[in-house]
Image (cartoon, helix red, strand yellow):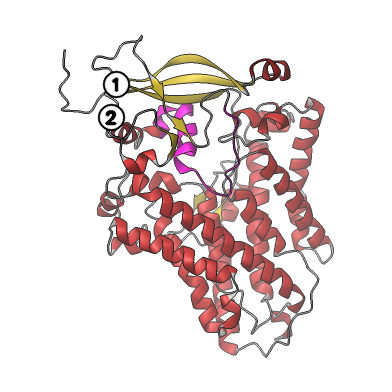
């Protein structure tokens, strides 16, 4: 079937596949390096406890069959290894069916991780990676031309990512309609990057222009993805430029990068395809069947996207095959941060020596400049931002984190930039305090060298010690 194939997008497929495989590597490395403290056997939200109360059909995962920290680590590093092989192009050296199986492996492994990840894996880019990764299984290798229907479904994902985000903004916070959200966003975003301070201090008219351009890119440009070339390529290229601007302005894990990879699949890149044999009938039938399934599953996400009660980042099936996306439907005007401190004093007092724990990415020391971490995802740092918005976001894990800090738990401390206590001398008490943070002005930066100014607001957690530990007088 000639209409089934799009040989002109052979190079686009190649770039898309290598980019997606690289993001899989990042995701698996993130999981392997952080899981023990977050959801391991002694983690803050242990996987064994979760699978005991959650049926398999609600959250399909290999870890329903067996869980140990060693097995989880093996799955994560295996996923990293397979993904690295895909980056290197191993799928191009295999028969078509074997290449499809190879692409299926990281999807199955990462699905198993996400479905037991609980709060730590509740971000929209987790489902986005799974939805895109599932389609990649059916995109083919050097034995076949890229299937038109799969390329169309990739554009359908990109459309939902951008258009859904645009709609949630227009329906949500009034500052998006007034073009004023960027007066606050760069300062209050979850994890600022090294250039965020400078973005915040851009002239306000430029901020208005940025918001207006964002509305155009998210609400008008996505429609052009389904128009003939070169309009579709131009639309995708504009989205790529917008995403690169967002990469510079903050740390959003791999959300921007996977959107860029998706957009590249819609760009007709130059390059002559190699000689391609005829497309096998079984492959055509399988691709069309999967496409029909995904179109059917798109009903609920499309309905949600058009609803006045639109929700962000929701999966409508346990396999995360078709999801709804969106970000920053509302923008905070004030930045709060939870600062965690410990003391070695037997009896905690206000004048005790309270030492501050330093996190890798979230603001702490006002003089410490933010670093670039994305596409790597600092899960604990992100959740600390939510905890500052409301204690309700921290109810399931914050107490467990404090307990691990009181024990000087090695795996938990590895998630931090620095602990103020030596490994053999854990703190006697931990407390948390809420501070208001704001960016310094140009004059303040020159005078103090600090990019942040912070003001104490209130107690977040009173001094706490391990239960059962006797207090000496």
- In front of the other: 71 or 121: 71
Name the residue at the right extreme.
Answer: 230
For the residues labelled 1 and 2, the Cα–Cα distance comes to 8 Å
- In front of the other: 291 or 354: 354
The vertical placement of 449 against 406, above or below, is above
Q: Residue at x 75, y 56 (%)?
A: 223
Task: Give the residue number, with chain letter if any, for mark 1.
Answer: 344
The vertical placement of 433 against 15, above or below, is above
The magenta segment: 368-393
Query: Residue 269, which numbered label?
Result: none
Instruction: Estimate how packed mark 1 is, as few (under 14), some (14 to 19) or many (20 or more) residues with alpha carbons within 10 Å.
Output: some
Residue 100: x and y in percent read: 53, 77
Q: Earlier in the sequence, mark 1 or mark 2?
A: 1
Q: Quadrant of the N terminus?
A: bottom right
Task: Give the residue number, with chain letter if any, for mark 2.
Answer: 425
Residue 156: x and y in percent read: 65, 61
Magenta run includes residue 388? yes
Q: Residue at x 48, y 59 (%)?
A: 320
Residue 431: x and y in percent read: 35, 22
269 vs 148, left or right, is right
């Amino acid at each position: 079937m000639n209409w089934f194939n799009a040989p002109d997008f052979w190079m686009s497929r190649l770039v898309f596949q290598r980019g997606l495989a690289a993001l899989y590597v990042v995701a698996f490395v993130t999981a392997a390096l952080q899981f023990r403290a977050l959801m391991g056997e002694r983690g803050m939200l242990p996987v064994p406890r979760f699978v005991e109360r959650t049926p398999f059909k609600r959250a399909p995962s290999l870890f329903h069959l067996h869980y140990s920290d060693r097995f989880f680590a093996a799955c994560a590093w295996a996923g990293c290894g397979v993904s690295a092989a895909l980056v290197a192009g191993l799928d191009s050296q295999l028969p078509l069916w074997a290449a499809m199986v190879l692409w299926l492996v990281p999807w199955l492994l990462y699905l198993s991780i996400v479905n037991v990840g609980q709060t730590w894996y509740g971000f929209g880019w987790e489902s986005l990676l799974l939805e895109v990764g599932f389609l990649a299984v059916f995109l083919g290798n050097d034995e076949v031309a890229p299937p038109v229907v799969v390329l169309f479904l990739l554009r359908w994902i990109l459309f939902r990512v951008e258009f859904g985000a645009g709609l949630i903004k227009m329906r949500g916070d009034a500052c998006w309609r007034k073009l004023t959200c960027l007066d606050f966003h760069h300062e209050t975003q979850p994890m600022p990057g090294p250039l965020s301070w400078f973005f915040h201090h851009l002239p306000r008219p430029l901020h208005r222009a940025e918001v207006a351009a964002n509305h155009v890119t998210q609400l008008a440009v996505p429609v052009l993805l389904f128009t003939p070339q070169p309009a579709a390529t131009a639309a995708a290229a504009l989205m790529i430029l917008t995403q690169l601007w967002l990469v510079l302005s903050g740390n959003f894990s791999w959300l921007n990068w996977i959107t860029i990879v998706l957009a590249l699949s819609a760009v007709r890149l130059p390059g002559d395809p190699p000689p391609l044999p005829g497309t096998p009938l079984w492959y055509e039938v399988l691709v069309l069947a999967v496409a029909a399934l995904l179109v059917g599953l798109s009903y609920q996400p499309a309905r949600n996207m058009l609803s006045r009660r639109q929700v962000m980042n929701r999966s409508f099936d346990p396999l995360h095959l078709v999801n709804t996306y969106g970000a920053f439907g509302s923008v905070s005007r004030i930045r709060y941060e939870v600062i965690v401190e410990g003391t070695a004093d037997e009896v905690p007092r206000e004048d005790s020596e309270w030492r501050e724990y330093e996190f890798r990415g979230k603001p702490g020391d006002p003089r410490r400049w933010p670093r670039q971490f994305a596409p790597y995802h600092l899960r604990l740092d992100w959740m600390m931002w939510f905890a500052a918005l409301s204690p309700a976001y921290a109810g399931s894990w914050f107490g467990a984190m404090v307990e691990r800090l009181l024990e000087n738990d090695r795996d938990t401390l590895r998630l931090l930039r620095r602990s103020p206590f030596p490994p053999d001398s854990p703190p006697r008490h931990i407390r948390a305090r809420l501070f208001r943070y704001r960016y310094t002005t140009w004059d303040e930066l020159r005078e103090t060298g600090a990019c942040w100014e912070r003001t104490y607001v209130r107690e977040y957690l009173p001094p706490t010690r391990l239960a059962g530990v006797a207090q000496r007088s």
